[in-house]
């Protein structure tokens, strides 16, 4: 499996109600995240939008992309980043990190 961080950047020309209307029309919540994905974290980043980190089987990357293209476009600008968990290494190296 791979971890992917997805930035769902609020389109600044829309308010939250308008974004919600687009997401509902596109059936975003029925498509994202895809059933093959496990949500690692889901945060709101003020000034950006939502930041979602997912763990998915490598062969499911296309389905993740399609769920964004079909569900999020028109409400969010999107960015994808391969991600890995560095915390265990940091925690081991620096004993002051809890």
Image: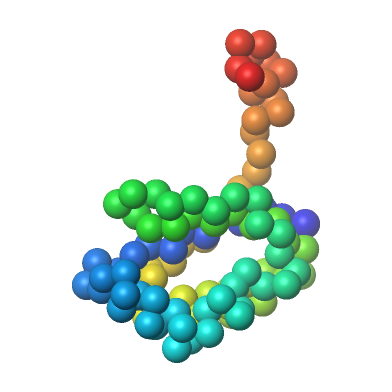
Residue lying furthest left in this view?
Answer: 13
Task: Assign the N terminus to one quadrant of the image.
Answer: bottom right
Which residue: 59% across, 73% down? 32
Which residue: 61% across, 80% down? 30
Q: Is residue 50 above or below residue 18?
A: above
Q: Is residue 2 above or below residue 29?
A: above
Which residue: 34% across, 65% down? 10
The image position of residue 11, as x and y in percent, is: 30, 69
Q: Residue 98 falls in which quadrant of the image?
A: top right
60 displayed left or right of 48 = right
Residue lying furthest top in this view?
Answer: 96
Q: Which of 59 and 72 lies nearest the eye of the viewer?
A: 72
Q: Which of 98 and 70 lies nearest the eye of the viewer?
A: 98
Residue lying furthest bottom in this view?
Answer: 25
Q: Is residue 37 above or below residue 19?
A: above
Q: Is residue 17 above or below residue 55?
A: below
């Amino acid at each position: 499996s791979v971890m992917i961080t997805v930035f769902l950047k609020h389109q600044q020309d829309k308010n939250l109600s308008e974004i919600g209307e687009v997401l509902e029309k596109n059936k975003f919540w029925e498509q994202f995240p895809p059933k093959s994905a496990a949500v690692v974290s889901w945060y709101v980043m003020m000034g950006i939008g939502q930041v979602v980190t997912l763990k998915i089987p490598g062969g499911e990357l296309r389905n993740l992309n399609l769920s964004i293209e079909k569900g999020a476009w028109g409400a969010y600008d999107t960015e994808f980043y391969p991600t890995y968990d560095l915390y265990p290494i940091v925690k081991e190296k620096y004993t002051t990190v809890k």
